[in-house]
Amino acid sequence: MGGGTAMSVVECRNLTKSYGKLSAIDDLTFDIEENKITGLIGRNGAGKTTLLKLIAGYLRPTSGELKVFAHNPFNSLEVSAHTMFIDDNMSFPNTFTLVDILVEVAPFYPNWDSRLAQGLFDYFSLNPKQRHGRLSKGSKSTFNAIIGIAARCPLTLFDEPTTGMDSAVRKDFYRALLKDYIEHPRTVILSSHLLGELEEILEDILLLDQGTKRLQLPLIEMKEFAIGLRGNAQAVLQFIEGREIIYQEEFAPSSLYVVVKKDLAPGAYDRARQNGIESVPVFVNDLCIYLTGKSKGGIDDVFKRG
């Protein structure tokens, strides 16, 4: 949002983080611009949490370069003063009740809004006398998310923030985050494997697959990135000859559904229709699943008898 050249809050060049022989993050290069909500999307085990912990300065990179607010984030006071990392492992002293925590965290965050924190706390009907360690998974996620929103940190990292929340609470959380972000722009990175629900609040998507970058695009472009084609298998294969197939599955004998990049002139799809090939939009959530799938086919292929 706003005019002028956007500043990159996170700059990442050939970043690698290995544990022994296993690379959790593998030669990753990307920038994240200031004052955007970016979705860090990927399957479980894609490296999302490791990447967020590197950005937050909790982990030291194995190789490559990572700059956050132009500093190396590992053990940097400058970075930690402007960054907040919200995940379900956040811990607070056991003697503190939830209301104590809200009072105690306030001085650490210059932008903290206690009215907003209290308003969200009451809205989500949390019990002020409850202890953090005794909360259910969903209530803990809700409470942590309230802190993440009310702190208004210049860089706020949410790692799978809606774990355990029911769908009504998830929707309210996204809405609260978006409303406050519009009034107080900041850089938000939100990791999730549930992209469908997030579409309304994300501007950019960084798609990870086994520690590598599969794609980084504005959501608007993601929506136009691919197209699904459905029809007689022979006709479909002929039409897409020589093009990379992102996904394919047989949905009936000799009928084929394929997903390819949407980079042909619109007239081409009219010609396809004349050959009995139907073109259908591809949802962003499905596209992310297809792009990070190990095999090009669907689950049905497992059940095929040779």
Image (cartoon, grey):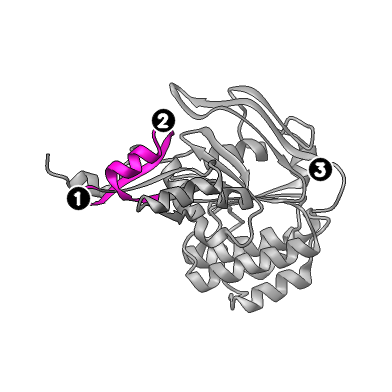
Element under disc 1 = loop
Graded by Cα atoms within 10 Å as few (under 14), some (14 to 19) or many (20 or more), the crowding at tag 3 reads: few
Q: Is residue 16 above or below residue 133?
A: above
Task: Give the spatial CA distance, label 3 vs label 1.
Answer: 51 Å
Tag shown at residue 6: 3
Instruction: Please name whichever residue, 284 or 73, is drawn nearer the observer in this view of the structure.
Output: 284
Query: Which three-letter amino acid code belongs to the residue tagged 1?
Result: Pro
| Residue pictured at 42% horizontal, 48% vertical | 272
The image quarter in which residue 151 lies: bottom right
Instruction: Please name whichever residue, 262 or 80, is drawn nearer the observer in this view of the structure.
Output: 262
| Residue pictured at 44% horizontal, 52% vertical | 286
First reached walking from the N terminus: tag 1 or tag 2: 2
In-image side of 84 versus 301 (left or right): right
Q: Position of residue 16 (x, y in %)?
A: 57, 25
Residue that carries the numbered disc 1 in the rendered image: 253
| Residue pictured at 61% horizontal, 51% vertical | 219
Query: Which three-letter amino acid code belongs to the residue tagged 3?
Result: Ala
Read off the magenta span.
229-254
Task: Give the spatial CA distance, label 3 vs label 2.
Answer: 38 Å
Element under disc 2 = loop
Tag shown at residue 45: none
Of discs 3 and 2, which sits in the foreground? 2
Of discs 3 and 1, which sits in the foreground? 1
Residue that carries the numbered disc 2 in the rendered image: 242
